[in-house]
Image: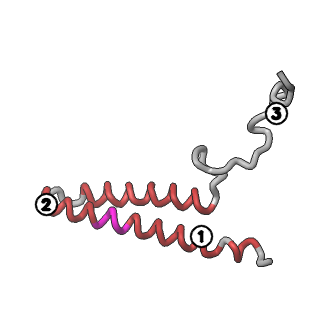
């Protein structure tokens, strides 16, 4: 069995590349929209920020899903206490 940092390597690399592509793609689309509308850096900056935020959320959800308040698998056993009435027959 490989060490944990070796097993997570491809997952981290994939998430990092996805983040980079998100920022670049949204910035490029913002640049194209700026050219059509005539607003010089407005949509470029908005696209880059939107891509960075979306890419970061994706990055964290892939690398450390316990950090996000949504979508991750919770490993905390105290999150939902056992129901004593559940096992009782009617």
Q: Quadrant of residue 1?
A: bottom right
- Label 1 vs label 2: CA separation? 36 Å
Q: Is residue 78 left or right of residue 35?
A: right
Q: Where 46 sits versus 81, above or below? A: below
Disc 2 secondary structure class: helix
Measuring from the top left, give residue 20's x and y in whole percent. Answer: 44, 69
Are discs 1 and 2 less than 8 Å apart at CB?
A: no
Name the residue tied to disc 1.
12
Mark 2 crowdedness (10 Å alpha carbons): few <14, some 14-19, many ≥20: few
Q: Where 12 sits versus 47, above or below? A: below
- Label 1 vs label 3: CA separation? 35 Å
Name the residue tied to disc 2.
36
Task: Residue at 26% x, 60% y: name it.
Answer: 30
Measuring from the top left, give residue 54's x and y in whole percent. Answer: 44, 56
User: Magenta part of the protein: which range?
Assistant: 24-28
Measuring from the top left, give residue 25's x and y in whole percent. Answer: 34, 67
Q: Quadrant of residue 47?
A: bottom left
Circle on res. 82:
3
């Amino acid at each position: 069995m490989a060490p944990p940092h070796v097993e997570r390597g491809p997952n981290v690399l994939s998430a990092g590349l996805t983040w980079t592509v998100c920022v670049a793609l949204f910035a490029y689309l913002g640049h194209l929209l700026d050219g059509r509308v005539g607003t010089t850096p407005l949509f470029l900056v908005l696209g880059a920020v939107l891509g960075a935020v979306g890419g970061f959320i994706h990055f964290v959800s892939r690398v450390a899903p316990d950090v996000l308040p949504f979508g991750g698998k919770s490993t905390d056993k105290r999150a939902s206490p056992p129901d004593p009435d559940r096992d009782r027959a009617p």
